Image (cartoon, coloured by chain):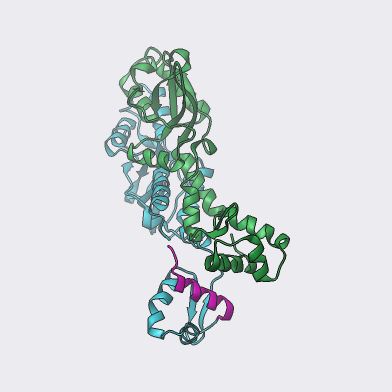
Chain colours: A cyan, B green
Amino acid sequence: MELSKRQEQIIGIVKQDGPITGENIAEQLGLTRATLRPDLAILTMAGFLDARPRVGYFYTGKTGSELLTEKISKFKVHEYQSVPIVVKEDASVYDAISTMFLEDVGTLFVVGEHACLTGVLSRKDLLRASIGTQDLNAVPVHIIMTRMPNITVCRKEDLLLDVASKLITKQIDGIPVVKDTDLGLEVVGRITKTTITKVFVELITDNHI
Amino acid sequence: MELSKRQEQIIGIVKQDGPITGENIAEQLGLTRATLRPDLAILTMAGFLDARPRVGYFYTGKTGSELLTEKISKFKVHEYQSVPIVVKEDASVYDAISTMFLEDVGTLFVVGEHACLTGVLSRKDLLRASIGTQDLNAVPVHIIMTRMPNITVCRKEDLLLDVASKLITKQIDGIPVVKDTDLGLEVVGRITKTTITKVFVELITDNHI
């Protein structure tokens, strides 16, 4: 966002004299409180200023680039997760490969009893199985999947940045978003390197704060 | 970056009176030109101010968040590309799968005569081949690869943002970085969704401008 001259002036005043009331800012600028209201609202929403009741406005001390990265670092998983594709433990490797192509995903999640997460299948897991196995219809996925507790999971309130960081450090393509239930972990979403690449492109293209 | 009080003052002066010489800024602040030199250098490098010989400093009119996204949108491919893994056209599908596991990559590039790019192999290409083929040693990769001209390529001076955008729109995991030669396209690097995810994490974690 580009600040107007008046908004820059307001920041200057609050930086120098804050905490300061809206009334007093208006006085210094020779304007009415009502005239200033939209500018103060914008500056507060954008994070340049903060306001406390009965105290007034104060400067947060942050530059635009810090505010942007701070904002991005607060993105939550549930705002960006996509739909998870699951297969059952007793599905065959052949069925899992077919599902992967049909659904056009790179990672499948495996569920057992009560539809709870028990494993993960990557393209490489399926590729490894398919070159080592004669009859892919005869092998159930639970034989070849990566299983709990060796699975990295995340929850919808987790930070997207932390999940992106795990994709890199754990060298995996996708992480299931799970919900804790009495019976185990229910799979409710997925975050993948595609998710993060999309967020990157949209952020820079939209140039939004 | 967080601006110092003096740097904020300089921006204020340039905003009001620019274009203005360093000499004149120093005068207004009651400081010497030498004292101001480091601050002016920082503000110019960070993009807040611009300088023209015999004219002076002027304000670029950009907020920190615009400068950050503007900076990111200028990242070049060659600053972030990783090493490409290539196989020859007559390598068997089995060899290609082995190479993919050994090198721990998700995309292989295929080269023909003169070591020039002729095709790309994704994990899904290899998975599709491996379930449909009895003897993976007997099938050369040129039978199953995606081939030129259906391959998306990029060059080292291209913008990382544009390549990230292509990864999404073309629904692919990796794009070869190529160099034009008299004999064809030489493969010199790769950009993948992993590259972009890493850049995203580092940007937000380092909070650099």
A4 falls in the magenta region: yes
- Whether residue A172 is visible, yes or no, is no
Task: Count the numbered circles shown.
Answer: 0
Q: Nearer the viewer, residue A19 or A11?
A: A11
Q: Position of residue B29 (x, y in %)?
A: 66, 70
- Whether residue B87 is visible, yes or no, is yes
The image quadrant of residue A101 is: top left
* Horizontal side, residue B154 vs residue B129: left or right: right
From the image, which quarter does the N terminus of chain A lie in? bottom left
The image quadrant of residue B165 is: top left
- State the extent of the magenta-drawn residues as a range: A1-18
Which residue occupies 39% across, 31% down?
Answer: A126
From the image, which quarter does the C terminus of chain A lie in? bottom left
Q: Nearer the viewer, residue A154 or A75?
A: A75
The image quadrant of residue A127 is: top left
Which residue occupies 45% across, 54% down?
Answer: A160
Residue A89 against residue A73 in the figure, above or below:
above
A122 falls in the magenta region: no
Q: Position of residue A204 (x, y in %)?
A: 42, 51
In the displayed image of the protein, which residue is found farthest to the left?
A102
- Chief secondary structure of the magenta span? helix
Q: Position of residue A60 (x, y in %)?
A: 54, 71
Residue A95 against residue B51 in the figure, above or below:
above
Which residue occupies 32% across, 49% down?
Answer: A83
